[in-house]
Amino acid sequence: MHIHRLEKIWLVFGCVMLAVFLVIIGISAFASGNQPPSDATLIDPTQVDQTKPFDKPGLKKIDDNRYEAVMVSQAFQFTPQDMVIKKGATVDFLVTSKDVVHGFEIVKTNVNMMVVPGHINSIEYTFKKAGDYLIVCNEYCGSGHHMMSTKIKVVE
Ligand code: CUA
C-alpha cells in the first residue's frame, strides 16, 4: 500500500500529539495529584439531616494542615457559612444537596463541581494563599440562585 509523504507526516504528527497529551494527563494526575471531583458515594437526599456526617455540617480539624468541610447545599444557601482555616492547609470538601442540583465553585481556583442530590460530592483543595475565598453556586437552582454563596477565610 502506498501512503503519500504528507499523509505519513500527519499520521506521525497525530500519534506524537496523542502521546504528548497522555503524558501531560499522567503527570497532572500522578505527579501533581490532580483529580476530578468524586460523586461515587450515595446518600438518601430526604435523610440528609439524619445521615452522618451531614447531621452535623461544619468544619472539622483533622490535624495541623488538614480539615474536613462537611457542607449541605439547599435552595438558597450553603451550610456552614464563613469558615476560617490556616494558610497552607488542605481541605476535604464533602458536599451534598437536600433538594435540587447546585454548583460548588471556589472563585479563582480550579475547584468547580456539581452538587447532585443523592450523591456525596467530594473534592480536596490546598489553600496556598491567605485571603477571602468566595464559594458560589454556579448551577441555576431557582429564584434565589444569585444569592447562594459562602466564604472561606484563609489566615496566616
Ligand atoms: Cu444553588 Cu444556584
Image: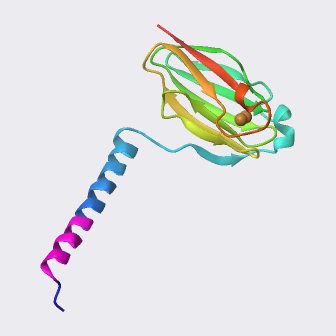
Q: Quadrant of residue 13?
A: bottom left
Closer to the camera in the image, 109 or 96: 109
Q: How is the image coloured?
A: rainbow
Q: Is residue 23 above or below residue 12?
A: above
Q: Position of residue 140 (x, y in %)?
A: 71, 40
- Does the rendering let one see residue 53? no
Q: Quadrant of ligand 1?
A: top right
Q: Quadrant of residue 141?
A: top right
Q: Please tell me whether residue 5 belongs to the stretch shown in magenta.
A: yes
Residue 37 in the image, given as x and y percentages of width and height = 56, 43
- Residue positioned 31% across, 49% down in the render: 24
Q: Kindly identify the residue that appears in the image at 34 percent across and 41 percent down.
A: 31
Is 136 situated above or below 28? Answer: above
Residue closest to the far top: 156
Q: Quadrant of residue 88?
A: top left
At x 72% / y 25%, what residue is drawn? 147
Q: Residue furthest bottom?
A: 1
Q: Which quadrant, please, contains the N terminus?
A: bottom left
* Coordinates of residue 129 in the picture (x, y in percent): 43, 17
Range covered by the magenta-colored residues: 4-14
| Residue situated in front as seen by the camera: 88 or 110 | 110
Answer whether residue 133 is visible to the viewer in this image. yes
In this rendering, the answer to whether 96 lies above or below 7 is: above
Q: Which residue corresponds to the image point at 60% horizontal and 40% vertical from the top-left? A: 113
- Between 118 and 11, the one lying in front of the other is 11
Magenta stretch contains residue 153: no
